[in-house]
Image (cartoon, rainbow, N blue to C red):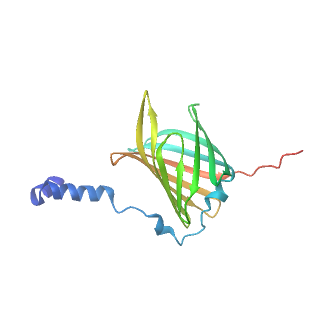
């Protein structure tokens, strides 16, 4: 039934409610992955050197940017620190430093200079869901966008990340990343 048919039959308020429920869906919950394996251990996975390859697609699916990220992770003062160095295909470079603190068995909070407020993360089994508001520079302005970030651990050591970026509930695009721990040769004396 077309939206106009819904509106005339049930009224605009009902049609709007049905449309919103259709657009938002029920969604995934981190708890849905409680018994999945391999379990993701954020501290173990991100301590040391990790490399990621990613891309940003707009809401129409067009790839707008590609990048790599070199991450150096370590624990300091009870927090997992992630120093992320981005290099984009066009040569632009960027840096973000996350500080993640584990609050309980399943809950994390995170902070970074370009994050508005505190990021909240939930870890269950192989999945980590991280939600935050990013201050995204666009031209001469800074726009606040919501990130709904999902990471899934795989048996081969690859961590897959998919983040949906939105504003006012409208999907702006997606970021997809593939992470892999890097083996480091011991430094010679």
Q: Position of residue 10 (x, y in %)?
A: 12, 60
Judge by depth and name the residue closer to the eye, 168 or 182.
Answer: 168
How many numbered markers are drawn? 0
Q: Is residue 20 visible?
A: yes
Q: Residue at left 65%, top 59%?
A: 157
Residue 171 on image: x %, y %? 37, 47
**Quarter holding the C terminus?**
top right
**Percent x, y of residue 169:** 33, 49
Q: In this picture, is 28 found above or below 130?
A: below
Q: Is residue 24 above or below residue 136?
A: below
- Is residue 149 in view from this perspective? no
Question: Where, by quadrant of the figure, is residue 1 drawn?
Answer: bottom left
Q: Residue at x 77, y 49 (%)?
A: 184
| Quarter assignment of residue 139 | top left
Q: Residue furthest front?
A: 77
Q: Is residue 73 above or below residue 124?
A: above
Extreme residue toward the right, this view:
189
**Residue 148 appears at what percent x and percent y?**
44, 52
Residue ID at (15%, 58%): 6
């Amino acid at each position: 039934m077309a939206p106009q048919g819904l509106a005339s039959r049930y009224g605009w308020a009902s049609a709007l409610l049905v449309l919103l429920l259709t657009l938002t869906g029920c969604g995934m919950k981190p708890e849905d992955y409680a018994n999945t394996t391999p379990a993701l251990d954020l501290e173990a996975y991100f301590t040391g050197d990790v490399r990621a390859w990613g891309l940003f697609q707009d809401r129409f699916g067009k790839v707008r940017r590609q990048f790599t990220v070199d991450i150096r992770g370590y624990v300091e003062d009870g927090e997992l620190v992630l120093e992320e160095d981005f290099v984009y295909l066009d040569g632009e470079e960027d840096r973000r430093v996350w500080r993640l603190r584990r609050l309980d068995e399943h809950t994390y909070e995170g902070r970074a200079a370009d994050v508005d407020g505190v990021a909240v993360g939930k870890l269950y089994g192989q999945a980590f869901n991280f939600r935050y508001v990013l201050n995204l520079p666009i031209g001469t302005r800074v726009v606040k966008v919501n990130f709904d970030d999902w990471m899934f651990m795989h048996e081969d050591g690859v961590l897959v990340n998919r983040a949906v970026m939105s504003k006012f509930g409208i999907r702006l695009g997606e970021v997809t990343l593939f992470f892999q721990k890097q083996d480091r040769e011991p430094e010679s004396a």
